[in-house]
Structure formats: structure tokens, C-alpha cells
Image (cartoon, helix red, strand yellow):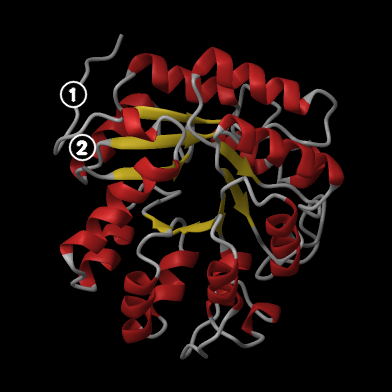
Amino acid sequence: MIIDVHNHPHYRGYGPQKVIENMDRYGIDLTVLLSWEAPPTEFHPEVLHEHSPLSSNPLPFTACLEYKYRYPDRFLLGYCPDPRVPGAVARLKAANELYDLSICGELKLRMMYDNPDAIRLYRAAGELGLPVLMHFEYGHDTPNNMYPWPDWWYGGGIDVLERVLQQCPETIFIGHAMGFWAHISNDDGYKQINYPTGDIVPGGRVEQLLEKYPNLYCDTCGRSGCNALTRNREFGRDFLIRWQDRVLYARDLWENFHQETIDSFDLPEEVRYKLYEGNARKILRGGDRIPTGTQLSRTNAK
């Protein structure tokens, strides 16, 4: 079985049927669909035109529900309210009670993620058994004068992540995106570019945090994870084996290079199982209830 722990509804023109066809093409049995809730000042307006023309949020939770309703056996649900909005904790709890969430995510906001209101949300998620998935980005590689900001940064950086981990030891966190994976190397490449290249300097902050905080996991989604793992393929293979219990297969796109990259490392079968399925079963809320077997039944749309 293959579980994609990070993707989105209404993303780049992929409606429910097209997503199912994509999953079947690449042998993906389950996809976790994540919302993205943010105020209009924190994302480019073209995001709405491309992904959510009927919503004021970039990727609304209602879209996740639409896909889940049509294909209940193929999707799991993720939802994260903006913790700065009053009632965020109550909304998370209500969504979990009503819709059986698997994850709290995606958190992608132009704020420091150790905001006290955010800490309150993370602790509530931990009490519910929901891991929290965070997007980190330093804001490089964006054109000048991009409305409404000249760059896009999210989360506040790797030091903020450590402060969060320290304050919420009972909550599981999943780090991802450029501002996370750039720290696979112990250098300052993250200061210049979103996707650093060149050899890896051992001892990067990602590994430091994985070593120090057992509640930290990471996913391979987007381009950042695969970019980090292939900067030095020997290092990347060793990283996946060393942290086989803490890495999750994820895409955040409708492409297949994530599987191609993982498979190209010729990993031991037990490592592949953990990346593709085992770790997701371990940390997703309700992961122990996911049916076993090679593939789930191909359910017709309702």
C-alpha cells in the first residue's frame, strides 16, 4: 500500500475524478487531503483563480469534504484553522468530531509559528491525536513587487520550529517545504535560495532536531524534499535509512518523481514500507484503522 500524506483538493485543475485517475496511475491507495486557510494578505490572489475560485481561502476544507464524499475509501482528511482567528481550537475540535480528521494541516501562514495562539492550537491537536503539518519558507526566489508583498515567507524559520517542539512535546509535528529541507545541510545555503544545491555538509539542523525531538517527522512533498535527498545521493540514502522511522512519503503535486526518487535509492524493503505506509499508520489519527492489503477497493463515485 502507498499513502500520500500531503496533497490538496482543487489544486492545479485536479477535480475528484482526475485525482483518482492520477492516484491509480501511480499506484497510490490513499491520499490525505489538506486544507490551507489564510487571510488574503498572505497569498497571491492568483492562487484563488487557479485553485479555489468559489472560496476566499486558498484551499478550503469544504473541498476536502467534496472529494471524501465522492470517494470515501480513497481519501483521509486534514484541516488546520488559522490559529489567530478566534474560535480556532473549537473549530478544530468540531471538525474532528464531525468529520474524523487524520491530521491538522496544512499550516502555512505569514507568522511566527510559536505565536501563543498557535501553541494553544498545537496542544489541542496533540490532545486529539492529530499531528500538525507545517510549511516553512524563507521567501527567496520570488519576483520583485509581487502583490501584496515582494516575497513569501511562512513560519519564521528553523529556530521557531525548535521553540515549538520544546513547548509541545506531546504533539507530533511534520516539517516540510523549502525552509525546512534546506537545513538538511549544515551551511547557510538557506539564506540565499529556496532550493540549495551542491554537496551536503553533515550535521544540518534537520538532523539535529530529529535527534533531539522524537515528536518531529518530515515529509518528502513538493520539490524541496527530493532536492535535499539528491544533492548527494549517498548521503540521501543514508539519511532515509538512518531516519526511516521519521520520514513520510508525500507529494503536494500530481507528479510521480517522489516515488521515482525513493525507489532509485534501492532501499531495504522494510525501509520502503515505513516511508510509503508504516510511518503514516503510526502517526495519523486513526492510522491503525486503515485497511491492510496491497490496494483498497476502487469505490465508484457517489
* Disc 2 to disc 1: CB gap under 8 Å: yes
As displayed, is residue 68 above or below residue 245?
above
Which numbered marker is on residue 24?
2
The three-letter amino acid code for the residue at tag 2 is Asp
Q: Which of 235 and 125 is in front in this view?
A: 125
The three-letter amino acid code for the residue at tag 1 is Arg
As displayed, is residue 285 above or below residue 177?
above
* Residue assigned mark 1: 298
Label 1: few (<14), some (14–19) or many (≥20) C-alpha neighbours in 10 Å: few
Q: Which of 79 and 138 is in front in this view?
A: 79
Residue 182 falls left or right of residue 33: right
As displayed, is residue 104 above or below residue 44?
above
Upstream in sequence: badge 2 or badge 1 = 2
Q: How far apart are marks 2 and 1 (CA)?
A: 9 Å
Which numbered marker is on residue 138?
none
The location of residue 99, given as percent across then percent down, is 51, 17
Residue 190 falls left or right of residue 288: right
**For the point 36% across and 50% down, which residue is it?**
279
- Where the C terminus falls, by quadrant? top left
* Image-quadrant location for residue 233: bottom left
Residue 213 falls left or right of residue 274: right
The location of residue 162, given as percent across then percent down, is 70, 64
Q: Would residue 49 be seen by someone viewing this image from the given angle?
A: yes
Q: Say which element carries label 2.
A: helix
